[in-house]
Image: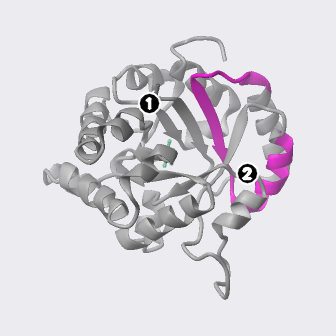
């Protein structure tokens, strides 16, 4: 059975004082559930402290980025092993802000995905088209290219220990959410493309939607058959809002 996953991408927000309060509220509001996973992805510098705070809780830790290299003279970079060392289980790979602002191309994203896998981190591989690409009718080819680049380097079997997040760039931080039908269309496309290589892997893969998800629109998105949860930006910084989104992923069951 596919697991529902709600992951909070804090981006470059937070402070030690703010985090303590936010994490405390999330921990006490999310009791854990066999069918769902709640993940938070704070900035690197806070990972270790938050990892301790999450101990004995049902909430998992993820990072927002990692180096494609294992170790060495790479000033400012953080390796997969280091992330494991401080208690991360997940890592975002290929977020559109990394692609657009820091020049991460498909090849580098594929190497980061492989680096995460090599150390037992679960990559949350982000894919998504820009507004111009969507309006030009290129959504499916763009998503296909982003997926295929990863699968050119890593075997399709690695997706058994990975998550894919569809984040249309035009929906990120804009308040403009994809409609449930638009999200479903791309999610179904992703699953079909992977099923062409391995039907079982595709059927079991959790596909998250990200882009202006809020408590008020989460239920209708998560009701779509191929939407298995969300990657949440702004709304993950508000504990009650984030917990309400977690609850929506569990079909309203108590979390
Ligand atoms: P928002 O939820 O703020 O639109 O951000 C989405 C996102 O980029 C999560 O990775």
Tell me where residue 70 appears, x and y as whole percent.
Answer: 62, 75
| Mark in the foreground, 1 or 2 | 1
- Image quarter of residue 12: bottom right
Q: Say which residue appears at 27% left-offset and 53% top-offset.
A: 143
Above or below: residue 36 compared with residue 158? above
| Direction from residue 46 to residue 188 in the image, left or right | left
Image spot of residue 81 (x, y percent): 69, 65
Which structural element holds mark 2?
Answer: loop
Q: Which residue: 66% across, 34% down?
A: 238
Find residue 158 and name its label. Answer: none
Q: Nearer the viewer, residue 242 or 71?
A: 71
- x and y percentages locating residue 112 in the rendered image: 50, 67
Depicted 253 relative to depicted 99: above or below: above
Q: Which mark is residue 14?
A: 2
Looking at the rendering, the stretch of residues picked out in magenta corresponds to 28-53
Q: Nearer the viewer, residue 100 or 173?
A: 100
Residue marked by disc 1: 228
Within the image, what quadrant is residue 106 found in?
bottom left
What's the distance in space between the residues labelled 1 and 2, CA to CA? 27 Å
Q: Is residue 50 highlighted in magenta?
A: yes
């Amino acid at each position: 059975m596919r697991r529902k996953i709600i992951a909070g991408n804090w981006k470059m927000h937070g402070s030690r004082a703010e985090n303590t309060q936010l994490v405390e509220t999330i921990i006490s509001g999310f009791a854990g559930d066999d069918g769902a996973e709640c993940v938070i992805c704070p900035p690197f510098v806070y990972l270790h402290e938050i990892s301790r705070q999450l101990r004995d809780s049902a909430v998992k830790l993820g990072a927002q980025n990692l180096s494609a290299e294992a170790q060495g003279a790479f000033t400012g970079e953080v390796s997969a092993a280091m992330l494991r060392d401080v208690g991360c289980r997940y890592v975002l790979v290929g977020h559109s802000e990394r692609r657009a602002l820091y020049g991460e191309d498909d090849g580098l994203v594929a190497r980061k995905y492989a680096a995460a896998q090599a150390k037992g981190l679960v990559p949350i591989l982000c894919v998504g088209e820009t507004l111009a690409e969507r309006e030009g009718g290129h959504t499916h080819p763009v998503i296909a290219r982003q997926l295929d680049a990863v699968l050119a380097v890593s075997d399709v079997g690695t997706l058994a220990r990975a998550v894919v997040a569809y984040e249309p760039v035009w929906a990120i931080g804009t308040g403009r959410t994809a409609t449930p039908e638009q999200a479903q269309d791309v999610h179904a496309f992703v699953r079909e493309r992977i099923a062409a290589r391995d039907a079982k892997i595709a059927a079991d893969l959790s596909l998250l939607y990200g882009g202006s998800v809020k408590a008020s629109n989460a239920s209708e998105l998560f009701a779509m058959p191929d939407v298995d949860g969300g990657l949440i930006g702004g709304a993950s910084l508000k504990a009650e809002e984030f917990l309400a989104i977690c609850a929506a992923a569990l079909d309203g069951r108590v979390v």
